[in-house]
Image: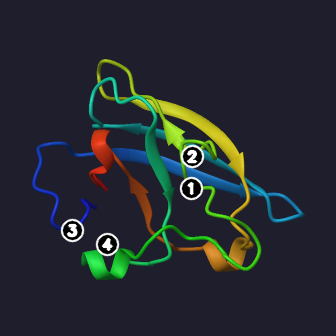
Amino acid sequence: GTYPEYTGHLKAGGRVTVTFNDDDTFKFQYDVSGLEANCSGCGIHIHAGVSCATAAEVLGHGWNSVVVQDLWTTAGGAFYNSDSSGSADGYFETFNGFGYEENKDHAVVIHIQFVRHLV
């Protein structure tokens, strides 16, 4: 669903698939539309929260600070580039210090330009 308190006109939809390796690194694959057109270096990542009902439940980036630094950044590869119709598909590989069970059913947040939240 739409990020709490987002009041814009965009309605993102699509699919995100996360495939884990034996060492808990994972491939984060996305195929989404309804995004801001030509959004370059826009964030997409797993959050610590498991619900998008309220902003307080979404929480921040989901990562284990005891094990790794926050890699849910553009520098960490966690971003998408949308085309002129507002669609994006691609993937990146990362490690957030958690395995499958700790990531399962968590909120995925898609950002638009200037760090605003969309979904």
Q: Residue at x 50, y 67 (%)?
A: 61
Q: Are marks 2 and 1 in contact (CB under 8 Å)?
A: yes
Where 91 falls versus 8 (above or below)? above
Question: What is the three-letter code of the residue carrying label 2?
Answer: Ala
Alpha-carbon span between mark 4 and mark 1: 18 Å
Q: Are marks 3 and 1 in contact (CB under 8 Å)?
A: no
Q: Are marks 4 and 2 in contact (CB under 8 Å)?
A: no
- Quadrant in the rendering for residue 102: bottom right
* N-term mark: 3 or 2: 3
Q: Residue at x 37, y 74 (%)?
A: 58
Query: What residue sits right under mark 3 in the picture?
Result: 4
Q: Residue at x 27, y 75 (%)?
A: 55
Question: What is the three-letter code of the residue carrying label 4?
Answer: Cys
Q: Are marks 4 and 3 in contact (CB under 8 Å)?
A: yes
The crowding category of the residue bearing disc 2, from other C-alpha atoms within 10 Å (few below 14, some 14 to 19, many at least 20), is: many
Q: Are marks 4 and 1 in contact (CB under 8 Å)?
A: no
* N-term mark: 4 or 1: 4
Query: What residue sits right under mark 4 in the picture?
Result: 52
Query: What residue sits right under mark 1 in the picture?
Result: 72
Which is more toward the observer, 79 or 66? 66
Alpha-carbon span between mark 2 and mark 1: 5 Å
Alpha-carbon span between mark 3 and mark 2: 21 Å
